[in-house]
Image (tube, helix red, strand yellow):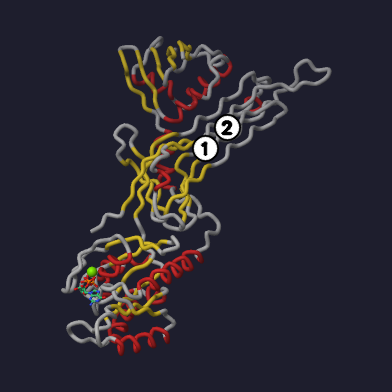
């Protein structure tokens, strides 16, 4: 079986949030007015978007790093920063996206499986803008002299896997020449033999027209009467053609060894398609009379052509051996595929469908891990707490006091105390170290609760 998967690993990073502004209103006769620092703009996010026109991940073979735009900083007079633009990475239909473990580069979580044109998945959310000092006014803090820095964006590696989805499927009884046709019109090299069920698993190939249009064609195991009820190998595979735009219905004009009738064969296959799924029977179909190079096939060709026409299906007489007729069949297929695919509204972008991943990511992000790193040293880690630390202006005592207050409210002090953290122990978050000064008996309005030891 030809392996038709294409993989790419890329690093994606949303835009950082802009910093909130610390500012006070200036008025002609007032030395210092109220706070008026605006919020930073949000950073842009990175989305993968399914694009029906793409057929490979080639765009991601040489470029591996993608960044969305950062938000700009807030300003005085309550002026908000500008949000960063989102970045859209177009990927082919049938692309599965996974988050990779940063150390092993093994897949960790599935983010999304994009199957509809225009479908979007957020793969790297941007950082939220920091809040300006107007947000930190309380009854006791009338003039907050600090603002929040922007939230740093998430950066991680993701895997893109393109599972090639066929545009057209070669369908027909065994030995009618389906594999011979795909071998002739694409680079696929399936096994071809004069016994039924030579093909056991689907083969995929890319067919191209001389003017450069292409479509993906699948050659699948032969269908037999009763396939829709599970007979033969066809059932398993009927599932695979449910997504194809076009059915290439292949009929052996010679009637095979049994001297079958072309019209009977045509009706048998269409009957199976209809029994399996009426939509498959309704799907655009091109009728292909194969082995037209053989003598005595003219009568069958005429009958089949008339029948196809009556049913509203284009008809082509071809030979997979000599190549006759295939030069007309391929462009006709390309045309119908693009008509069908084009009529699928690229429309309104489908909302992000990776809610499950977002939930699991948010959960991981919220979790706070505390470990003992030494006799009197502790480490706190977790996406959210680490961002809170990074968003704090460490040159500003008020900002540090505010952070300390939030940590206390989140129960971190209590957890540390319960684990045995004693006054004076060092508590580390990222590259910052604090000295622990007890959970309950701290003067929470001073910056001294967690003394900063260095950043
Ligand atoms: N003369 C002639 N023989 C053909 C033509 N196309 C296919 N054959 C022969 O028909 C036999 C079956 O061809 P395959 O391409 O394996 O048929 P298939 O439909 O893929 O068969 P399964 O995979 O078993 O369903 C082989 O012996 C081919 O050489 C053709 O256009 N002309
Ligand atoms: Mg075959």
Q: Hey, which quadrant is residue 204 in on the image?
A: bottom left
Q: Looking at mark 2, is its residue's CB closer than 8 Å to ligand 2? A: no
Residue located at (24% from left, 82% from top): 294
Under circle 2, the secondary element is loop
The quadrant of the picture occupied by the N terminus is: bottom left
How far across and how far down the image is residue 438, in percent? Answer: 43, 14
Q: Which residue is mark 1?
A: 68
Q: Nearer the viewer, mark 1 or mark 2?
A: 1
Q: Hey, which quadrant is residue 242 in on the image?
A: bottom left
Above/below status of 310 relative to 24: below
Residue located at (52% from left, 13% from top): 443
How far apart marks 1 and 2 lie (CA) works out to 14 Å
Relative side of 308 to 452, left or right = left
- Quick one: label 1, few (<14), some, or many (20+) residues within 10 Å? many
Residue located at (44% from left, 14% from top): 434
How far across and how far down the image is residue 411, in percent? Answer: 44, 25
Q: Which is more N-terminal, label 2 or label 1?
A: 1
Relative side of 239 to 12, left or right = left
How far across and how far down the image is residue 20, in percent? Answer: 61, 27
Q: Which residue is mark 2?
A: 129
Q: Which one is in front, 66 or 208?
A: 208
Under circle 1, the secondary element is loop
Pointers 1 and 2 in contact (C-beta within 8 Å): no
Above/below status of 66 relative to 190: above
Q: Quadrant of ligand 2?
A: bottom left
Q: Which one is in front, 380 or 171?
A: 171
Q: Which one is in front, 228 or 319?
A: 319
Q: Which mark is residue 409?
A: none
User: Residue at the right extreme?
Assistant: 29
- Quick one: label 2, few (<14), some, or many (20+) residues within 10 Å? many
């Amino acid at each position: 079986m030809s392996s038709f998967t294409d993989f790419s690993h890329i690093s994606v990073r949303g835009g950082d949030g802009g910093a909130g502004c610390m500012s006070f209103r200036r008025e002609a006769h007032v030395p210092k007015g109220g706070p008026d620092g605006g919020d930073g703009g949000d950073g842009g996010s990175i989305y993968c978007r399914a694009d029906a026109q793409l057929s490979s991940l080639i765009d991601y073979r040489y470029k591996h790093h993608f960044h969305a735009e950062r938000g700009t900083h807030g300003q005085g007079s309550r002026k908000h920063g500008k949000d960063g633009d989102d970045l859209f990475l177009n990927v082919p239909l049938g692309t599965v996206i996974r988050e990779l473990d940063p150390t092993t580069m093994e897949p960790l979580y599935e983010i999304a499986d994009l199957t509809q044109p225009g479908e979007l998945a957020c793969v790297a959310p941007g950082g939220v803008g920091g809040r300006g000092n107007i947000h930190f006014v309380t009854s006791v803090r009338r003039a907050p002299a600090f603002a929040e820095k922007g939230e740093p964006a998430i950066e991680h590696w993701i895997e893109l896997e393109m599972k090639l989805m066929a545009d057209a499927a070669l369908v027909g009884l065994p030995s009618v020449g389906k594999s011979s046709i795909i071998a002739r019109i694409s680079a696929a090299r399936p096994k071809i033999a004069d016994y039924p069920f030579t093909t056991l698993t689907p083969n995929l190939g890319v067919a191209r027209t001389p003017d450069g249009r292409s479509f993906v064609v699948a050659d699948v195991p032969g269908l037999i009467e009763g396939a829709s009820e599970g007979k033969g190998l066809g059932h398993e595979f009927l599932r695979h053609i449910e997504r194809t735009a076009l059915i290439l219905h292949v009929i052996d004009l010679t009637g095979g060894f049994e001297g079958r009738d072309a019209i009977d064969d045509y009706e048998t296959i269409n009957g199976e398609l209809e029994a399996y799924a009426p939509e498959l029977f309704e799907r655009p179909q091109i009728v292909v009379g194969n082995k037209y190079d053989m003598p005595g096939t003219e009568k069958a060709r005429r009958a089949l052509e008339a029948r196809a026409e009556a049913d509203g299906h284009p008809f082509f007489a071809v030979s997979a051996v000599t190549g006759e007729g295939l030069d007309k069949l391929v462009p006709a297929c390309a045309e119908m595929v693009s008509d069908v695919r084009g009529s699928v509204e690229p429309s309104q972008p489908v909302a992000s469908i990776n809610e499950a991943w977002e939930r699991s990511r948010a959960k991981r992000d919220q979790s706070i891990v505390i470990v003992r790193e030494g006799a009197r040293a502790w480490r706190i880690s977790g996406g959210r707490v680490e961002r809170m630390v990074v968003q704090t202006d460490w040159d500003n005592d008020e900002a540090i006091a505010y952070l300390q207050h939030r940590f206390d409210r989140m129960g971190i002090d209590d957890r540390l105390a319960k684990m045995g953290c004693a006054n004076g122990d060092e508590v580390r978050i990222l590259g910052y170290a604090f000295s622990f000064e007890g959970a309950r008996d701290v003067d929470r309005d001073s910056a001294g609760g967690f003394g900063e030891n260095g950043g």
